Image (cartoon, rainbow, N blue to C red):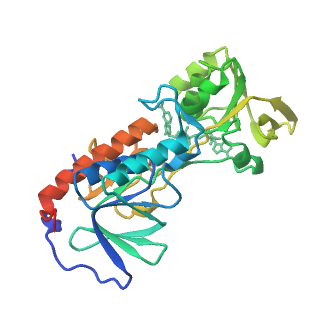
Amino acid sequence: MFRGGSATLLPTRPTETTVPTREYDVVIIGGGPAGLSAGLYSARARRRSLLIEKKGAGGQIATTDIVENYPGFPDGIDGFELGQLMHRQASKYGMDTEYAVAERVERLDDGRFRVHLDTEEAIEGKVLIVTAGADYNPLGLESEERLTGHGVSYCATCDAAFFVGQTVAVVGGGDSAMEEALFLTRYANKVYAIHRRDTLRASKIMQERALADPKIEFIWNTAVEEIEGGDNLSGVRLHNLKTGEKQELPLDGLFIAIGQTPNSPLISQFVTLDEGGHVPVNEWMETGVPGLYAAGDLRCNSARQVVSSAGDGATAAIAAERYLSEHFADLFE
Ligand code: NAP
């Protein structure tokens, strides 16, 4: 649906730049499963491909203890290791990696993209695949970061299986929180749903399901004031926002589902983001701007899984390859 016209792509003059610039066919921003998969496909298509990543390979999975739902690993795989393996695989076929922060993107007169890095360098690409992901919104408590991966999680699909027969809580009142709570009932004995108001934001059907589930107990008008535990989570301290009452709640697991913030500002000048800041794309991950793709958690309606993000990245790279063949015939120049 977004197959863009080519009239604006006829080579014209490049925009002047004074910073050192390198040129690639495919530039990818974000080194999670979507970006690494896009890099693998683009490099195997023998396109000069560069992945720009600010931290390390793997994105969110790099901080996941064990990934148990990525096909091919029946015993699960350490998230960090999976990221490293994906990176090694793409690099083996020639994908370059630049560890830097992409600060600004411009579209040149000839339809290519120029990415300005925090290293005072710029990278130009005939296509740009943005796979910068989304960050889970944190509660912002001091202990939260320390206990993440040690009882505190942002993804029930990833981590629920660690809590068989145990007591967990979900924070939030949206669809994500209800979905997490319902998923957790398959494993945990007891699921508390802690919400700061007395009405849910979630869709009616999700509300009905969660409210009807005997394993889920709602704690209304309540904020998590502190997350407690030494090496591992032991519980939370709650604060009733109506009565002022404080309460200790012992827990084995705490799932925070208070929304996500997509890392989309980088390309917001090119596309109209949805309410949540996600990038609308079609089934080929095309944004509507010729040569610009968005894949993974950054895009609208992402399933937010390693496997679906990897699929997105591959899809974007295949679409990009077709676009390059159509518009830039200089494969081996
Ligand atoms: P959301 O709809 O924005 O809900 C976030 C929830 O977290 C709200 O209940 C909010 O409380 C609460 N919250 C926000 N900041 C908080 C804080 N600092 N402390 C405590 N609670 C806080 O986010 P979402 O649930 O991730 O959903 C995002 C979008 O994806 C929505 O459009 C949703 O419909 C969609 N989605 C759909 C499905 C599905 O259809 N199966 C599944 C997941 C997500 P308040 O209500 O008081 O603001």
Q: Which of the two residues, 44 or 15, is positioned nearer the viewer here?
A: 44
Q: Residue at x 72, y 43 (%)?
A: 147
Which residue is situated farthest in the bottom direction here? 18
Q: Nearer the viewer, residue 145 or 211?
A: 145
Q: Is residue 217 left or right of residue 2?
A: right
When the figure is inspected, residue 150 is found, relative to residue 59, above or below; the finding is: above
Q: 318 left or right of 243?
A: left
Against 224, residue 200 (above or below) is above
Front-most of residues 22 and 322: 22
Residue 4 visible in the displayed image: no
**Based on the displayed image, in which of its 4 quarters is residue 199 positioned?**
top right
Q: Residue at x 41, y 76 (%)?
A: 121
* Total tally of numbered discs in the picture: 0
Residue 280 is situated, as x and y percent measured from the top left of the image, at 35, 48
| Residue at the (34%, 43%) spot, across then down | 312
Q: Give x and y (percent) for residue 179.
A: 55, 28
Q: Is residue 153 left or right of residue 26?
A: right
